[in-house]
Image (cartoon, rainbow, N blue to C red):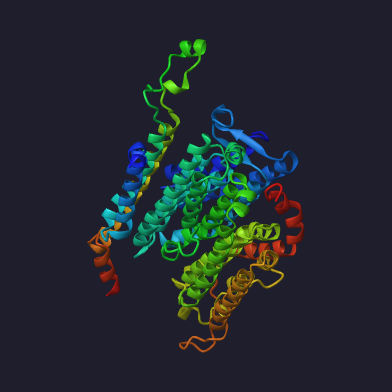
Amino acid sequence: MELIVAKYNYWIYVVLMMVGFYAMIGKRNLVKKLIGMNIFQTAIILLFISAGVKHGSKIPIVDKYEALEKGVDVASIVNPLPHVLMLTAIVVGIAVTGVALAILLRIYREYGTLEEDEILEKLGK
Amino acid sequence: MSVSNLHMYVMSAPLLTAFFVNLFGRKSPAVVAVLTLGSLAFSSLASLAVMGNVMVHGRISYVAGNWAAPYGIELVVDHLSAVMLILISVVALLASVSALKSVGQELPGREYQFFALYLILIAGLMGLVLTGDAFNLYVMLEITSITSYGLIAMGKGRAPLASFNYVIMGSVGACFYLLGVAYLYLMTGTLNMADMAQILPTIGGGAAVATALGFILVGLWVKMAFFPLHGWLPNAYSLAPTGAGLIAAPLVTKVTVYLMVRLMFWVFSSDYLFFTHPMVQSGIVWAATAGIICASALALAQRDLKRMLTYIIVAEVGYMVGGVWLANKTGLTGAVLHIVNDALMTLCLFLAVAAIVYKLGSGEFDKLQGIYRKMPITMAAFTVGAFSMIGVPPTAGFFSKWYLILGGIEAGHWEYVIALLFSSLVNAVLFFRIIEIGYFYKDEHDHGHEQRDEAPVLMQAPLVVCAVALIVIGLGSGPLVESIIKLALPAGF
């Protein structure tokens, strides 16, 4: 129990990831699969962001002259690198989602449905 | 342009040209052709110069934006990445000559869209082999994937559906890779690969490092279509426009195998990989064995040339993964040499298929009757590619397979050796079946008077160059291994 409470951010990431994974594998609707993929990506973003957090720390914006004079106490600011990385990952995620939605549009125009079973039925005919 | 940043130009040329293709190529396909071929010819020449520089100076590093190495993003070229850089630019150049014709026929008026994506895909692949930063690698991986999704979805009929499956599978692969990098970053506090390699031995092989390795490997296996994670590949590559198959089939899976080698030996160490968990090493060789046998058997069941080749690609991925994980120098030499050879022989076969599809409309076996009389030059080159795939000396395919078999014997993995021989046998059956249909069967409708009806010269020229290259590389594989591949292997292995 203590393990779950102390590391609750990691547990949330694991649960979110499984939810996304289930949607991708288990759901038969193509849009739901895509949403599952988004949840999956969000889980990883959460993992990175929560890894940068430090208790009682401030945002990583420091006064240049003060920092040059006294140096920076690393423990007092949040690690900004994961945030920067995740900005990039969010952009990548949006690009993939955009392409996937465009492809879904073409599938819908072709088959008139986004249910995988119905599409396979139409292909079988 | 200087020694330290020449490799940046190799990668930037197709990337920047992609935007010009999109801007100025709308009116006339000729502009698209000139820009595409021009930029790729530049990249090919520059990559040869990069190889020359690397032979003289060794590892060359360029730091983007002048942020010093462990903090900024480093773009590194060493012997292995120089080989890959040449391979990518030359294969892309040859493929694009043929693709220009094929796309002109299949997607008339949309050349500028196709080739804009095509060039960004090539720039992404070059970025993959150059980057020295684990997170930058993820971004490049997604650049190549997103452009491939687009290219594949441009096909007819079921292609968008195949592309959507690829989006889902590809994203799972990329996310797994990113997750592995997250664990490595949490453990080491750095994203620079060279820096990670120095820190990892000091923190020991805990569960977190093992998890990171597991996620990275599975992620890359999805991307390279390692059996049984290959589900997306056959549909995606066979339903894509022929021009997209020309570039994706020879390069994407092979570059991903390169990434596996790069991350295994330049981030993790061979001691960690092969001795900390010996069961894992032999388990992966067994998985590769199963992959080779199953994919070869599935190839036998296909009745279409393109689909048959896609299953052969899956089997070939098994060769390379198995070769890398044999954990000896001979196997790794074979795997690296096979990356080069397999890219060229896959290109040769796909160029031949592109020429056949251009003339016949599809590659179904029934349509291939009498094809040797109709298209003698195309089929001669196809036969060279097929012999290389089977592993007949003196074609290139024989020599890398020879190294892989020797490596398998050295490591005592007889099951892998048997799988290689079985796969060669299946390839022989597959290709002789096509030769039989094409050479001996006659079309019922005419009586041996088939007219010669060859594909355009622009589609034959790269095909013939590629077939000759297979034989030349095969004959020169001794010096090639001694002077270049040996230097490209990880130090102390």
- Relative to B225, A90 lies left or right: left
The spot of residue B289 in percent (x, y) is 56, 68
Estimate the x, y position of residue B313 in percent, counting from the top left: 53, 65
**Residue B198: % across, % down:** 62, 38
Residue farthest to the left, as pictured: A112
Q: Quadrant of the N terminus of chain B?
A: top right
> In the rendered view, would you say B234 is above or below B72?
below
Q: Residue at x 45, y 59 (%)?
A: B104
Count of marks, rendered view: 0
Q: Is residue B226 visible?
A: yes
Residue B90 placed where, x, y %? 61, 53
Residue B31 shows in this picture: no
Q: Is residue B439 left or right of residue B149?
A: right
Q: Nearer the viewer, residue B146 or B419?
A: B419
Res A108 → quadrant: bottom left
Q: Would residue B218 be found to the left or right of residue B343 on screen?
A: left
Picture layout, residue A10 above or below residue B488: above
In the image, B456 versus B82, the foreground residue is B82
- The quarter holding residue B338 reads bottom right
Quick one: B286 or B399, which is closer to the camera?
B286
Q: Nearer the viewer, residue B164 or B289?
A: B289
Up the image or down, B74 lies above or below B141; here it is: above
Question: Which residue is drawn at the image coordinates 57% and 54% (left, top)?
Answer: B277
